[in-house]
Image: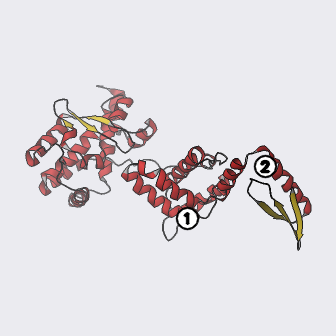
């Protein structure tokens, strides 16, 4: 039975039952204390001691505790790049909201957390952008899913689906214009012929920067004119067809470096290539063209050639057609040609 006693101007409830955890709470009125005691005793009648302990664990389990367990149990199975990104997110979450209990993070509380991330702070002077906030929310959502399914906290409610996610900005629409391609390649050729071939290869294959720079010879199949990419950014493997121009880039590089099966195709490091690329842009007097924009350019060219959208998606490795659409910007000339044909 519950005991209800007056403590000064408050009413204190205590519930002790053999095999169950001790429960207590304080209220302003005896009526509130009695109602709470009745409710809690009814809950105890419906549950085993183990079930009650699980509920209390979830109630007092802090976000910081859950993130530490997530780091030990879940993170090791993820890709190194994902681990690095999520460790940074978890450090930020622990520092700002680590003392919150999991059950305290409702949809309303999470919406306030999103507002906090959007505001400038010492850690993020410009605030977090929509994409970064979506990554924070994705980690929290996965954390709650694991807690419910694997840690015995079935009563937890995942707050992420209850929150409006920040709208992503339109994808970049920067493409090579006029004679920019010729100017850029000419400067790259003068800097290092390998740099020029890396740029050509990017434009021909639509591969990501990391996929290009980490490419090894054992992934190149000259007989079938393909490159096999394993464990890519979206977690899936894919086969990239090589155009004649792309294959010529690789053959020239083979003459320069040989083809050690486990060796990297390119001599440049990623940082070295990026530094040389941006110097080439400046020398060629080209503004605002990131290396990633070359992937946009390549994707758009594939679409302009009339390839089916699913074929383009298979080549580029975009997870969805919606994401592919953000990367594709058909030139006005190609649109006119598609409508007018040979007229």
Q: Position of residue 250 (x, y in %)?
A: 16, 42
Q: Position of residue 99 (x, y in %)?
A: 61, 64
Q: Secondary structure at mark 1?
A: loop
Q: Position of residue 148 (x, y in %)?
A: 60, 46
- State the residue in front, 119 or 138: 138
Q: Nearer the viewer, mark 1 or mark 2?
A: 2
Q: Quadrant of residue 226?
A: top left
According to the picture, the residue beneath numbered tag 1 turns out to be 119
Label ID, residue 193:
none
Q: Which residue, as the protein is rendered here, is positioned at the far right? A: 31
Q: Position of residue 340 (x, y in %)?
A: 34, 27
Tally of numbered discs: 2
Q: Quadrant of residue 305?
A: top left
Q: How is the image coloured?
A: secondary structure
Q: Which residue, as the protein is rendered here, is positioned at the far left? A: 255
Q: CA distance from mark 1 to mark 2?
A: 44 Å
Q: Name the N-terminal-most of marks 1 and 2.
A: 2
According to the picture, the residue beneath numbered tag 2 turns out to be 44
Compared to residue 196, the image places residue 341 above or below, namely above
- State the residue in front, 156 or 85: 156
Q: Quadrant of residue 329?
A: top left
Q: Secondary structure at mark 2?
A: helix
Category of crowding for the residue at label 1, using alpha-carbon neighbours closer than 10 angstroms: few (below 14), some (14–19), many (at least 20): few
**Residue drawn at the location 54% of the way across and 63% of the way down:** 94
Compared to residue 245, the image places residue 41 above or below, namely below
Quadrant in which the N terminus is drawn: bottom right
Category of crowding for the residue at label 2, using alpha-carbon neighbours closer than 10 angstroms: few (below 14), some (14–19), many (at least 20): some
**Residue drawn at the location 89% of the way across and 72% of the way down:** 9
- State the residue in front, 48 or 168: 48
């Amino acid at each position: 039975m519950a005991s209800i006693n007056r403590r000064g101007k408050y009413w204190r409830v205590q519930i002790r039952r053999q095999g169950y955890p001790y429960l207590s709470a304080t209220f302003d009125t005896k009526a509130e204390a009695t109602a709470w005691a009745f409710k809690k005793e009814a809950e105890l009648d419906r549950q085993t001691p183990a079930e009650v302990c699980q509920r209390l664990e979830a109630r007092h389990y802090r976000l910081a505790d859950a993130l530490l367990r997530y780091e030990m149990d879940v993170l090791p199975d993820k890709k190194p790049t994902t681990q690095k990104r999520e460790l940074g997110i978890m450090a930020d979450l622990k520092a700002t909201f680590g003392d919150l209990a999991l059950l305290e993070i409702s949809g309303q509380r999470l919406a306030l957390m999103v507002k906090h991330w959007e505001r400038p702070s010492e850690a993020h002077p410009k605030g977090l952008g929509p994409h970064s906030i979506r990554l924070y929310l994705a980690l929290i959502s996965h954390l709650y899913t694991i807690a419910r399914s694997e840690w015995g906290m079935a009563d937890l409610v995942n707050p992420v689906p209850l929150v409006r996610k920040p709208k992503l900005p339109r994808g970049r629409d920067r493409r090579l214009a006029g004679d920019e391609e010729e100017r850029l390649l000419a400067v790259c050729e003068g800097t290092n012929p390998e740099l020029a071939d890396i740029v050509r290869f990017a434009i021909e294959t639509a591969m990501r920067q990391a996929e290009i720079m980490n490419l090894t010879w054992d992934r190149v199949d000259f007989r079938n004119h393909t490159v096999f990419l394993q464990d890519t950014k979206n977690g899936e493997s894919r086969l990239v067809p090589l155009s004649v121009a792309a294959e010529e880039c690789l053959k020239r590089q083979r003459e320069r470096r040989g083809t050690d099966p486990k060796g990297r195709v390119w001599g440049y490091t990623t940082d070295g290539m990026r530094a040389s690329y941006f110097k080439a842009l400046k020398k060629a007097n080209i503004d605002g063209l990131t290396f990633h924009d070359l992937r946009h350019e390549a994707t758009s060219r594939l679409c302009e050639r009339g390839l089916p959208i699913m074929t383009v998606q298979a080549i580029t490795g975009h997870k969805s057609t919606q994401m592919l659409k953000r990367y594709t910007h058909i030139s006005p000339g190609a649109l006119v040609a598609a409508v007018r044909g040979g007229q």
